[in-house]
Image (cartoon, helix red, strand yellow):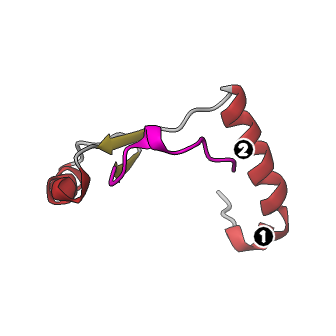
Amino acid sequence: MQGFIVFDYAKHYPAARADLAQWLSDGKIQRKETIVQGGLAKAGEALVDLYNGSNTGKLLVEVYPMEKFEKANL
């Protein structure tokens, strides 16, 4: 088995980021995330869920409704 240091490939980050953004946009890859709605009032419960392993992928606390934002460009 051979490992690598991610910083050895820093010069490839811009191209990788562009490829990943395109793949996300095309639906070739998908993010896994759990979004806790209810603002900062729910942050405590979200933290408990994080430590209990209740989430899938990233655990996010929605502090402002997503429908009020435009889609982010990576």
Magenta region, residue range: 62-74
Q: Is residue 70 left or right of residue 6?
A: left
Up the image or down, 74 lies above or below 3; here it is above
Tell which of 35 and 19 is nearer to you.
35
* Front-most of residues 2 and 71: 71
Which amino acid does the dot numbered 1 rest on? Ala
Q: Nearer the viewer, residue 31 or 37?
A: 37
Magenta segment includes 70: yes
Answer yes or no: do the residues labelled 2 and 1 have beta carbons within 8 Å?
no
Give above or below for 2 relative to 67.
below
Left or right: residue 47 versus residue 64 is left
Pinpoint residue 68: horizontal percent, then vertical percent: 46, 43
Which residue does the image show at 69% across and 50% down from the upper left?
A: 74
Q: Residues within 10 Å of mark 2 (few under 14, many from 20)?
A: some
- Helix, strand or loop status at disc 2: helix
**Is 56 located above or below residue 49 in the figure?**
above
Residue at horizontal 72 percent and vertical 34 percent from the top: 23
Please indicate whether residue 57 sits to the left or right of residue 73 in the image.
left
Picture quadrant of residue 29: top right
Q: Quadrant of residue 41?
A: bottom left
Could you say where residue 22 lies in the image, as x and y percent from the top left? Answer: 76, 38
Q: Earlier in the sequence, mark 2 or mark 1?
A: 1
* Residue 4 relative to residue 58: left or right: right
The residue to which callout 2 is attached is 20
Residue 39 or 19: which is nearer the viewer?
39
Disc nearest the viewer among 2 and 1: 2
Mark linked to residue 10: 1
What is the residue that sits farthest to the front in this orientation? 68
Q: Which amino acid, by three-letter code, is at mark 2? A: Leu
- Residue 71 location (% of width, % of height): 60, 41
Within-10-Å neighbours for mark 1: few <14, some 14–19, many 20+ = few
